[in-house]
Image: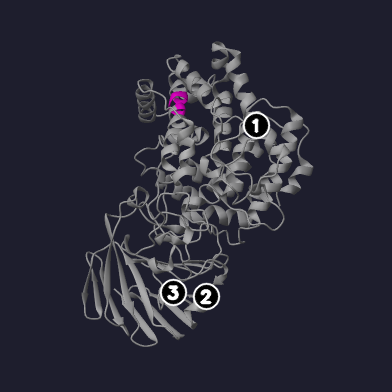
Amino acid sequence: MFSEIAEDLPPVLADFVPGAPFSDRLAWEAVSADMRTAVIGDAEAALGQAWSVIKASDYREYALNGNRSCFEALYFSRRRRLNDLVLAEMLEGRGRFIDAIVDGVFLVCEESGWQLPAHNAYERGGQRFALPDAEQPVIDLFAAETGALLATIVALLGDRLNEVSPLVGARIEQEVRSRLLTPYLTRHFWWMGNGAERMNNWTAWITQNVLLSTFGLKTDQGLRRKITEKALSSLDAFVKDYAPDGGCEEGVVYYRHAALCMAGAMAILDQAAPGCMARLWRAPKIRSMAEYISHMHVAGRQYFNFSDSAAVIEPCTVREYLFGKAVGSDALARFAANDRLSSKKPHLPDEWNLWYRVQELLVGSDLVAAPVDASKTDIFYPGIGLFVARDDHYALAVKGGNNGESHNHNDVGSLTLYKDGKPFLIDIGVETYTSKTFSPRRYEIWTMQSAFHNLPTFGGVMQSDGADFAARDVDVEFNEGSARISLDLASAYSAVAKVRTYRRTVTLLRGQHVEVSDSHDGDLPAVLSLMTCAKPAVDGQNLHLEGLGRIELDGGGEIEVDTIDIDDARLRLSWPSKIYRLRIPFAGTRLNLRIV
């Protein structure tokens, strides 16, 4: 798919300009006044602050106690602050921020390693080293992001920096070459792709930023060609693990690091070799990958979530809009443009990728509200087993698939339900990442366990992880009056659960209600968990959810309600301080729910 393009590349691969250089004053003067005020205000505040100090002990903290957030706060604050300063200088053009920019550039260049402590390994799942080895750089997500940041600064502001000293640009190029471009060509990192090995968002995310680093700097043609050929091979490795339907198994948050970064890589190559991506932009699979985000949207900032995604995410940006335009999807372009207008911080002060922020300023200022069809369609993604159905009040999702997918939560067969845009039955999401999150102890974390999804346990036995633990015998039907999915969940559990069949059928009767019918054949007692963020009241076999509606049960025993305190910062972005788990034992072999 991508590698075929290598044969038709032109003899000269052009520079990539991530926006408009400093010399294009008309472009930067056209940025809207509100965006200009916000960016310059942030940069002025940054001038009065001290740069973060990163010590070896800060880096070692992950190895000592598993904490990621303390080091990452120091690391990302430097990059965000440098972004603020560069953008303000591009807008204002008076040299007021140049000295601080040079300080920031040299601080980043003098870091011992650009890879995060959590990623400081040379093999997939390999040993994480407590400190970085400056002689053997690791290319992880954020080493590549850092190289792209510095290359973008050179592409935009290089001439101004050379007025301070030619050594500024030279230092950037030296560090990007030694930490990123040279190891990219001389080492194999797992995310580059290797035969049938499964890839994930890392492949597209890093490849985009390696290309941005290569073409943003004045690299030679031989290097550009070698990197391009390797990047095209990696993009092939990435898309091979996307089903033809375009569903992102990692969820909506990672769509922006997966399919959307693939689009970024394509845009860079399309500028370096004009027209080389024309055929791929028109490919049905690429278009389906692009449109996935709009199909996952519920209302406002609420999205269907599973895996390590969150239920509440930031509005779309220019990136989704440009992806929609590139693949010829007016529906995605309109959705993204309208969604972006709801952003309270369209200048993206929390973003560490400078190119994304430049796009917001130069392109986003021109976006206006577009007519959009308010109705959303049903869809089924067979590649990941994801079913989505809607009517005027309900938005329903059921996840099939398997428990070997990237960022998996052992949640085969779980359902998520919104009523009038409010969460009714929820997928909790993921807590703040620690060393345990991506380790053999991942499924000790409660949010990763099926007992904390809308799923059954059998004698306390939960689902198991791995691709073999999957939904079977899946059947889907959409028609004017209803939408239905039926699937057997028994294979998602190990033999210890002693369950032979567990047939779940979920039906949206449009304009009426939702029905869930679960029947099982097994030797251990079945207990269904339901997760909600609305306080439930139990009235016999009826559950009343405050401000939402009720669940009428048929075939259940005595219901227990667990209150779960939510104090994790990442979870609090989506949920209130308390959520609830309902535990409903089966009285027999069948349990029916009517949700109104």
Question: Splitting the image into 4 quarters, where does residue 269 fall?
Answer: top right
Q: Residue 451's spot in the image, x, y percent?
A: 40, 69
Q: What element does badge 2 sit on? A: loop
Q: Mark 1 points at which residue?
A: 135
**Is 83 contained in the magenta span?**
yes
Q: Name the residue under label 3.
A: 461
Magenta-tinted stretch: 82-87
Question: Splitting the image into 4 quarters, where does residue 420 fall?
Answer: bottom left
- Decide if residue 214 is on the left or right side of residue 446: right
**Is 363 contained in the magenta span?**
no
Residue at the image position 52 percent from the left and 23 percent from the top: 105
Q: Residue 271's spot in the image, x, y percent?
A: 65, 35
User: Does label 2 or label 1 sit earlier along the sequence?
Assistant: 1
Q: Residue 57's spot in the image, x, y percent?
A: 46, 34
Q: Which amino acid does label 3 sit on?
A: Val
Q: What element does badge 1 sit on? A: loop
Q: Which residue lies furthest to the front in this view?
A: 64
Q: What element does badge 3 sit on? A: loop
- Rounded to the nearest angstrom, the CA distance separating label 2 from label 1 is 46 Å
> Which of the labelled discs sits on residue 494, or is there none?
2
Q: Residue furthest bottom?
A: 588
